[in-house]
Image (spheres, rainbow, N blue to C red):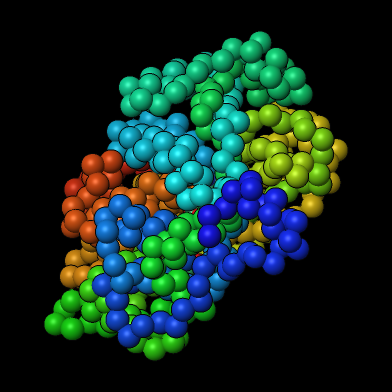
């Protein structure tokens, strides 16, 4: 069924009786050509592009819970491609371009809103760094715009530009950045993949791998053994736990990241803003809630809930630039499990085990990468070669010293 304005009107006039489930609920088959573990944004996007772009058949996505229950439905919805390093910027710009056409591509309203993102500058050294980053973005075909304090005041009059400790001295804007309704991305890709024949199997946890002669030939699941020509792990925060079952120890740690939503307010915040002297990022949802977040909790955990010291830290960051935040009441908060890699950048690669592939290490930033991650992972699975925008995301970069350390923090996963 195609969604359209006319369809909505027709259904409204006929009691909404014609809507069909957006995807099937199939029983798992004994074998598939490709099995994807994890029905988050990346797993579903991978399945969609495998079928749509690479013409692959007999694909299954196995999800231990429900579609959208992981980080894809827990994040703060920010998309952008404002990266500095060569390994990253072309990939994230590819992703932003895919976001721009996504709703037409999927025939699904994912509420892609290019309302712009603004990284605030608080010191002269930071201005130099942001100018460099803006130039790297322009060289890679992205948009970047250095704004003065006066320009920022015009658009965001409530910002505390004269804060004695963290004065706002300008900002790097990417006007094509913005927000996307996170869970709609999972639903849109799920519907698109299902229409192309992909089996999306919920409540099906992968509990082990089937190995024959050193190659991976399937998975053990809570619903029985499923054989596969290729197995593709795509489980974000659970990466270490899943790959451990194949005997692999990853350069990844798992940490909790929290998100917060205030009560609904009238429109106050036209775009996304980020604090440059701490970690705080904020946008306003279409329902009026201020959606914001900050640092991870800082210790290893697989819990999907966080602790109060980080709440205080995040709110302090917000109050430093945005004092009126103190008047808003907090409505909800929650946590997700972040797959923090050693250099802060992801891994999309085949493993040393034949037939077993890996996608993970997304840290804070995997939501914006969803379309490109799915596309390039599908490319790798279908062709055996890395996609041109993702050639740097290999396991062997940790052996060869070719880190993609965007933040310059060194091999300290909780600092990326
Ligand atoms: C609070 C928070 C805020 C964030 N904000 C942003 C942001 O603003 N912008 C941005 O770009 N990124 C953001 N992120 C990061 C982003 O959400 C993640 O990097 C990204 O969603 C991870 O990919 P995914 O969608 O595939 O993960 P998930 O949705 O977590 O998918 C992984 C799936 O694997 C399933 N799974 C795990 N183990 C198994 C198993 N054994 N068998 C079967 N299935 C299994 C899980 O149930 C889960 O559904 C944020 C994350 C959090 C938690």
**Residue at the location (73% across, 48% down)?**
261
Query: Relative to residue 219, is residue 41 drawn left or right?
Result: right
- Name the residue at the bottom extreme: 224
| Residue 302 visible in rendering | no
Q: Position of residue 127 (x, y in %)?
A: 50, 18
> Which quadrant would residue 17 be assigned to in this image?
bottom right
**Residue at the location (51% across, 49% down)?**
107
Vertical relation: 129 (above or below) 371: above
Q: Position of residue 370 (x, y in %)?
A: 44, 50
**Residue at the location (51% across, 76% down)?**
25
Query: Relative to residue 405, is residue 115 drawn left or right?
Result: right
Query: Relative to residue 345, is residue 3 drawn left or right?
Result: right
Vertical relation: 170 (above or below) 263: above
Q: Position of residue 338 (x, y in %)?
A: 50, 57
Q: Position of residue 283 (x, y in %)?
A: 66, 38
Vertical relation: 288 (above or below) 209: above
Q: Quarter of the image containing the C terminus?
A: top left
In the image, 318 versus 71, the foreground residue is 71
| Residue 318 visible in rendering | yes
How many circles with numbers are drawn on the protein? 0
């Amino acid at each position: 069924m195609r969604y359209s304005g006319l369809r909505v009107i027709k259904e409204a006039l006929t009691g909404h009786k014609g809507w069909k489930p957006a995807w099937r609920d199939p029983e798992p088959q004994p074998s598939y050509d490709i099995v994807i573990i994890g029905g988050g944004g990346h797993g579903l996007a991978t399945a969609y592009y495998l079928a749509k772009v690479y013409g692959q058949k007999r694909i299954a996505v196995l999800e231990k819970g429900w579609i959208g229950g992981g980080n894809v439905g827990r994040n703060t919805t920010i998309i952008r491609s404002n990266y500095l390093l060569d390994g990253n910027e072309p990939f994230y710009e590819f992703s932003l371009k895919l976001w721009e056409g996504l709703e037409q591509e999927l025939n699904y309203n994912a509420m892609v809103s290019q309302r712009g993102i603004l990284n605030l500058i608080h010191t002269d050294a930071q201005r130099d760094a942001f100018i460099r980053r803006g130039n790297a973005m322009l060289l890679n075909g992205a948009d970047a715009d250095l704004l003065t304090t006066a320009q920022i005041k015009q658009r965001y009059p409530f910002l505390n530009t004269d804060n004695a400790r963290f004065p706002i001295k300008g900002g790097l804007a990417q006007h094509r950045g913005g927000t996307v309704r996170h869970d709609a991305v999972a639903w849109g890709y799920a519907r698109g993949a299902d229409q192309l024949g992909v089996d999306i199997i919920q409540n099906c946890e992968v509990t082990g791998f089937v190995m024959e002669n050193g190659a991976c030939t399937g998975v053990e699941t809570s619903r029985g053994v499923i054989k596969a020509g290729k197995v593709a792990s795509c489980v974000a925060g659970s990466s270490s736990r899943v790959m451990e079952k194949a005997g692999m120890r990853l350069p990844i740690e798992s940490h909790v990241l929290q998100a917060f939503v205030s009560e609904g307010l009238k429109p106050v915040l036209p775009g996304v803003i980020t604090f440059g002297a701490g970690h705080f990022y904020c946008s306003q949802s279409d329902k009026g809630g201020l959606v914001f977040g900050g640092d991870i909790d800082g210790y290893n955990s697989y819990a999907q809930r966080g602790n109060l010291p980080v709440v205080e830290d995040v709110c302090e960051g917000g109050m430093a630039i945005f004092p009126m935040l103190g008047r808003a009441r907090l409505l909800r908060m929650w946590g997700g499990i972040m797959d923090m890699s050693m250099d802060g950048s992801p891994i999309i690669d085949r493993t040393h085990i034949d037939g077993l592939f890996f996608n993970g290490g997304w840290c804070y930033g995997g939501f914006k990468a969803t379309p490109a991650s799915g596309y390039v992972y599908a490319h790798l699975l279908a062709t055996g070669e890395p996609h041109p925008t993702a050639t740097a995301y290999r396991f062997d970069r940790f052996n060869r010293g070719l880190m993609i350390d965007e933040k310059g923090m060194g091999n300290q996963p909780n600092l990326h």
